[in-house]
Image (spheres, helix red, strand yellow):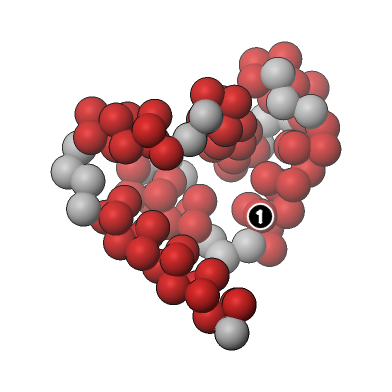
Amino acid sequence: MIEKLKEKELKELYEAILTLKNADECAKFFEDLCTIPELKAISQRYQVAKMLSKKCVYSDIVSETGASTATISRVNRSLNYGSDGYKIVFDRLGLD
């Protein structure tokens, strides 16, 4: 039962995000939803994923983003074995 509740809550969040029409609305929503450290962590992981997809080495990613090697490894695992969410976004943005 608890898992179904969490699934419902996540789906509602995803549906709420999908109602946003532009980057300004996204910024307003995420600034209300997340703390500054949470936003920094999310944006850092996204930058790490972009750099990994461009085959950058860990040392360059650490220097550029300040991410730990543990964070880089987790993002790399998501890129290689995850749900292809990064790939969907990168393809749509022409970043592949």
Residue that sits furthest to the right in the current view: 70
Residue in view at x 40 percent, y 67 percent: 11
| Mark 1 residue type | Ser
Residue in view at x 44 percent, y 73 percent: 8
Up-down: is 88 above or below 37? below
The N terminus, quarter of image:
bottom right
| Any part of residue 44 in sight | no
Secondary element at tag 1:
helix
Up-down: is 79 above or below 23? below
Query: Residue 38's quadrant in the figure?
Result: top right
Observer-nearest residue: 6 or 94?
6
Mark 1 — residue? Answer: 78
Query: How many residues crowd around disc 1 within 10 Å: few (fewer than 14), some, or many (20 or more)?
Result: some
| Any part of residue 59 in sight | yes
| Side of 60 relative to 21 (left or right) | right
Image x and y of residue 78, in percent: 66, 55
Image x and y of residue 51, in percent: 60, 32
